[in-house]
Amino acid sequence: MGKSWNAEFLRKTDDRGYPTEYLLSRIRGRRAHLIADWRPLVLSDSPVDSLALTRYGSIMTDDYPEAIRQYLLKEFGWVYSQMNRTLRKIFRPFFLYTELSTIFICLRNAIGKESGKIDSILSSSLLSEKIKKILRGDLLSALGGLEDYFTGLSARFSGLRNTLENTGLRGIELTLSTGYLEHTVHSKLHPVMKDFFVSVIDSRNILSLYKYIRLNGKSVPPFITGGRISENMFMKIAAKKDLLEVGSMAHKLTKIASETAPIETSLNRMVTRLLRKAGREPLGVGLILDYLWRTSLEATNLSILLYGSETDRRIITEEMVQ
């Protein structure tokens, strides 16, 4: 497997030896504070004022995306800090996957040499101090440092500087996210975690196919291996450029009619349903992952709500994952 999932990627946190049931009890309490009914917020003339009554009330600033993201990372950090060694080993692939977005945002800011913004972005991150130091450098040195770390996991991460020259930062993000998902799903994972990553891969592949056909793309997008649906199936539909077949594929996978909700929303709801069911497994891994996923979706819904103040309320409701 190469480099192990240890503090080289995620920050060091002492193992406090808390039993798993202790964390499960705490999460059950925090889960009660998740927003269960979005209708009052969607219909409110001032969602910001309404959010003052939720756990997000203290972070409402003009920079909504960053404030919401920082809150999400702090919550993830709290869960990670409460985990014992066994749970951390199970969840490290998930936490590093969520931190890929932190890496991407830092790289974008490195182009403009926005060191202050990078420090702010990293303030609540679970990334290790070594990775944070790399991300505080200029773009090329950051890519070199990231390549050194990630090629320890897999050779597929090599050549990031060449990728930058050929396809820009978008290519870097695609290389890291695709490579990470393919490497992780073929690694030894807890069954609940395995199901999660397989579902993420299926969702990303379907969405890529949908966008390719919908926008009449010039070249077929690369599909991530390791999902339930074969690359051959995706290539056949891509050749036909038939959106109806994409909708049929999404419906078979999600059991949600594609015409009743945006396809990305349907795919997220599929993962939500999977994790709610997994939340009943006896060891508690599913319950923890369900909470982390729902907290992440809550942050996404808040962004949709706050940026959609001028958007039709019906459209906002359809785009939210509940």
Image (cartoon, grey):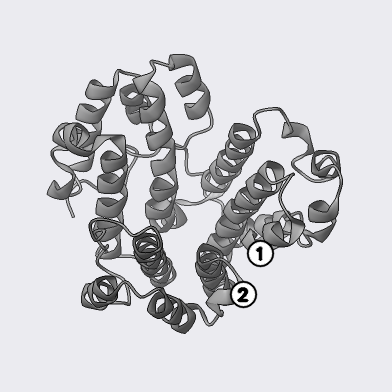
The quadrant the C terminus occupies is bottom right
Residue 200 location in percent, x, y?
41, 64
Q: Earlier in the sequence, mark 2 or mark 1?
A: 2
Above/below status of 12 relative to 117 = below
The quadrant the N terminus occupies is bottom left
Q: Amino acid at mark 2?
A: Thr
State how far apart marks 2 and 1 are (Cα). 8 Å
Residue 70 location in percent, x, y?
59, 35
Residue 56 location in percent, x, y?
74, 41
Q: Amino acid at mark 1?
A: Glu
Look at the image and tell me whether residue 30 can be seen.
yes
Answer with left or right where residue 189 lies relative to residue 308. left
Q: Residue at x 19, y 28 (%)?
A: 144
Above/below status of 259 relative to 12 = below
Above/below status of 84 relative to 270 = above
Q: What residue is pinned by disc 1?
A: 318
Answer with left or right where residue 223 lies relative to residue 315. left
Q: Residue at x 24, y 66 (%)?
A: 225
Q: Residues within 10 Å of mark 2 (few under 14, many from 20)?
A: few
Give the label on residue 260, or none.
2
Q: How many marks?
A: 2
- Quarter of the image holding residue 141? top left
Q: Secondary structure at mark 2?
A: helix
Question: Dots 2 and 1: beta carbons under 8 Å?
Answer: yes
Q: Residue at x 35, y 75 (%)?
A: 242
Residue 93 location in percent, x, y?
37, 53
Look at the image and tell me whether residue 282 can be seen.
no
